[in-house]
Amino acid sequence: MKSKLGLASILFIGATLILKVSGLIRDMVIAYYFGASYVADAYLAAFIIPNMLILFMQNGMKNALVPSYIQAAEEKRGRSYLGQVFKGTAGLALILSIIGMAIAPVLIPLLYPDFSPEASQIAIWVTVIFFACISFVGMNSVLEAFFDAENKFSLSIVSQIIVILSSIAGAFLFANQIGAYSLAIGYAVGTVLSLIFKAFIVVPQKSLTLKEKFDWPEVRQFYWIFLPVGLTVMVGQVNLLVGSVFASYQGEGAVMYINTAKNFVHMPQAIFGVTIATIIFPLLSKAITTNDTGQFKKGIEKGLTTMYLVLMPSIIGMMLLMPNLIELLYEGGAFDNKATEATTQVAYFYFGSVLFFSLNNIINKGFYTMKKGHLILMISIGSILLNVVFNFVFAEWLGYLGIPLAASVMALFYTGACLIVFTKLVGGLNFKSIIVDYAKITAAAALMSGAVLAVKPLISGLPNLFIIIIVAIVGAVVYVGAAFVMKSDAFMFLLHNVTKRKKKGATS
């Protein structure tokens, strides 16, 4: 059983990497075809609104359905329960889809009054297309959560990759003819293809039944669990919407700069968050099951230090290489050198949000493990008000550069609030140990930075790809060596887990 779970985790991490790379390619395609134009701004601004519901469905469903389905399966009613949730979610998603399409012509001008008539028109119809997909997204979300409950993690990721690849294909085939609509239509086709993909797996296995009479009390009970988790996810999207609205007042291209920089800079958070959660979460679950508070707190502490260990070289390395990375990945087609410089500047200000939100992912794992997710929701709602205030102040001061700065400062306050509440909830953490390890990791990162800064002038004449590869190798060697010499607890913890897995593989 453990070997199966280990294989599932490896496949999940690999599939997640492919998903993030696919998302990066999609952003590169948008940059190539539309650059920093009002067309790109309109598309990206429009996508944020329905994406709230998309993530509300996807992430909320996984956190709510997985434990409830497992319980129903143990009671020999898994097929029936999954069918009830599937029908209920399909109905809810259809209603939300119709409402969204109906209000789009009013919502877009209200949120983005500074858009030109052409940009507003694009944004309205893109929003309508995306809202039309919500009914398919709802059904997809239920089946993706079912795959997770069955430890088939990679299947749910593959289905999301299908949607992204369909969007990319739409742009390649039709961007020159119908512009940004090609991406939205490609996404719509992808949601249908993704549902068909899941049907080919679920239907032959008879994993759910849709013939039973609709059981409203059971569905209602499920949604009492689902709504707080889904709303917490939506709060994060509301904060993104706030940034997008403020960006729309900063002139053509600002929304594009912010969206491109945000997505790229936050890649380490998404990738490493998955890896570390795979290592840390079993510790938390086991501790809660055995009522071992000490082990539970130790798991959180390990998570915080391990996350910091893998993030610091990623963040600093990206900062030192940001102009090279943006130019290599995005510059070309309609995305010119001016857009590269602007996106690079925006990216620097987002690094605070990457660090703090990544650390907060560990704290949130603790809340969810203790079934205290409603506390995160309350703090998250407060973060919206903070975000509006910070955006107003910093955008007035720095223009569109103030928007990523507002996100980073808000992330600091949000993470600090979550940490304070969580610390009181568990009766304190060993902050002395955490701070000591953070100091060792920071020192190792400083040595890495010195080595990179010394090497970069020597290779400045090389193409960007070679500069990035050489700097990555030098930085990794120096950082790993420094962390090992300083005996960082987080580094030794990771090293122990890796060597232990290798030994198990060699003896099996």
Image: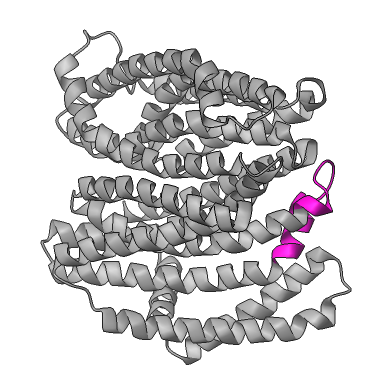
Whole-percent x, y for residue 398 in the image: 60, 58
Q: Which residue: 35% across, 50% down?
A: 383
Whole-percent x, y for residue 184 in the image: 63, 25
Considering depth in this image, is 224 or 10 the residue closer to the camera? 224
| Callout count | 0
Q: Which residue: 53% across, 46% down?
A: 15
| Placement of 455 over or under 216, stated as above or below | below
Question: Which of the 4 quarters of the picture holds residue 459?
Answer: bottom right
| Placement of 408 over or under 11, stated as above or below | below
Does residue 30 appear left or right of residue 265 in this picture?
right
Task: Kindly tell me whether residue 135 is visible in this rendering.
Answer: yes
Whole-percent x, y for residue 377 in the image: 27, 45
Q: Which residue: 14% across, 56% down?
A: 289
Q: Which residues are magenta?
A: 322-339
Task: Kindly tell me whether residue 132 is visible in this rendering.
Answer: no
Q: Does the magenta segment cover residue 234? A: no
Picture colour scheme: one colour
Which quadrant, please, contains the C terminus? bottom left
Question: Which of the 4 quarters of the picture holds residue 118?
Answer: top right
Q: Which residue: 37% across, 41% down?
A: 235
Does residue 333 appear left or right of residue 408 in this picture?
right
| Placement of 239 over or under 474, stated as above or below | above
Q: Residue furthest bottom?
A: 485
Considering depth in this image, is 155 or 403 the residue closer to the camera? 403
Whole-percent x, y for residue 407 in the image: 48, 55
